[in-house]
Amino acid sequence: MVSWVSLALAGLAASGVRATPVKVTRQASPTVYLAGDSTMAKTGNGLMGWGEYLAQYLTIPVVNKAISGRSARSYSNEGRFTEITGLVKSGDIVIIEFGHNDGGSPNSASDNGRSDCPGTGDEVCTSGKTGELVYTFNHYVEAAAREYVAKGAQVVLSSQTPNNLWEGGVFAPGAPRFVGYAASAAKNVGQGASFVDHFQATANLFLKLGSDATNALYPQDHTHTSPEGANLVAEAFVQAVSVDYNGTTPLKDFVKSPAPVVW
């Protein structure tokens, strides 16, 4: 299978992203919690996020806490990561997937409250609109992941879903920088964290589907899928988990058999 993800992902196996999940006392029925944006969330009006379809492919319950329009920064500032901290128990699994709303710069007077500070480490910016200190994508997701791991949960850092890669009729699979950021976040958190390249898994799906079939999954814009598209994107994620696409994740034990094969 050909991969178009940036070279930042090329050494995932050697770099430690294939981390062994932390050993915890497993509940009889752990819960999966989802943190993300509209591409994962329950939406409507002919659109839907993939998180609404994940449960049908797993043997354990899924609680979808994804919210439309959020970035790692705004999700953090609104206390939504903290809300999940109060819910998770030892053995639970949290999937974190952001990126669509994280671009741009917070420095201008028109700061939208979502843009992260550029960089992947300890860089700090100041909002040109509110004066708040703004941190990097990695800062926000890694801080949340460490909180969950400290409670005995396990975290899957998932790269964002792609936009319509066949928009305009030409396959354009270049990955945005937040795909690599999610991979590095999993590496930085270490034990208890793993990575799934949902972007590449879905890109593989879209390449297989072709231009017409893929375009039909985006009825309103190039970011948000129809319910049919959301289900396929969920299947692409589950397939990646089932075949250890980026190393083993704690979700693999709970994938229903047979696992979907869409790419």
Image: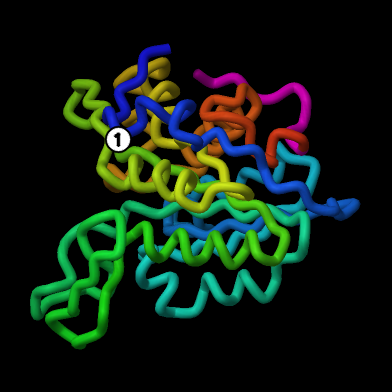
Q: Position of residue 124 (x, y in %)?
A: 23, 71
Name the main secondary structure of what is drawn in magenta.
loop
Could you say which is closer to the camera, residue 154 or residue 158? 154
- Asked whether 259 falls inside the magenta stretch, the response is yes
Indicate the quadrant where residue 89 lies: bottom right
Residue at 70 percent across and 66 percent down: it is 151
Few, some or many residues within 10 Å of mark 1 (<14, 14–19, 20+): many
In this rendering, the answer to whether 229 lies above or below 133 is above
> What's drawn in magenta, residue-wise?
254-263
Farthest-out residue, right: 28
In the image, is 146 to the left or to the right of 215? right
Q: State the quadrant of the N terminus.
A: top left
Q: Position of residue 11 (x, y in %)?
A: 39, 27
Residue at 61 percent across and 33 percent down: it is 238
In this rendering, the answer to whether 256 lies above or below 75 is above
In this rendering, the answer to whether 40 lies above or below 14 is below
Q: Position of residue 112 (x, y in %)?
A: 22, 73
**Which residue, given by chain and number where applicable, does mark 1 sit on?**
164
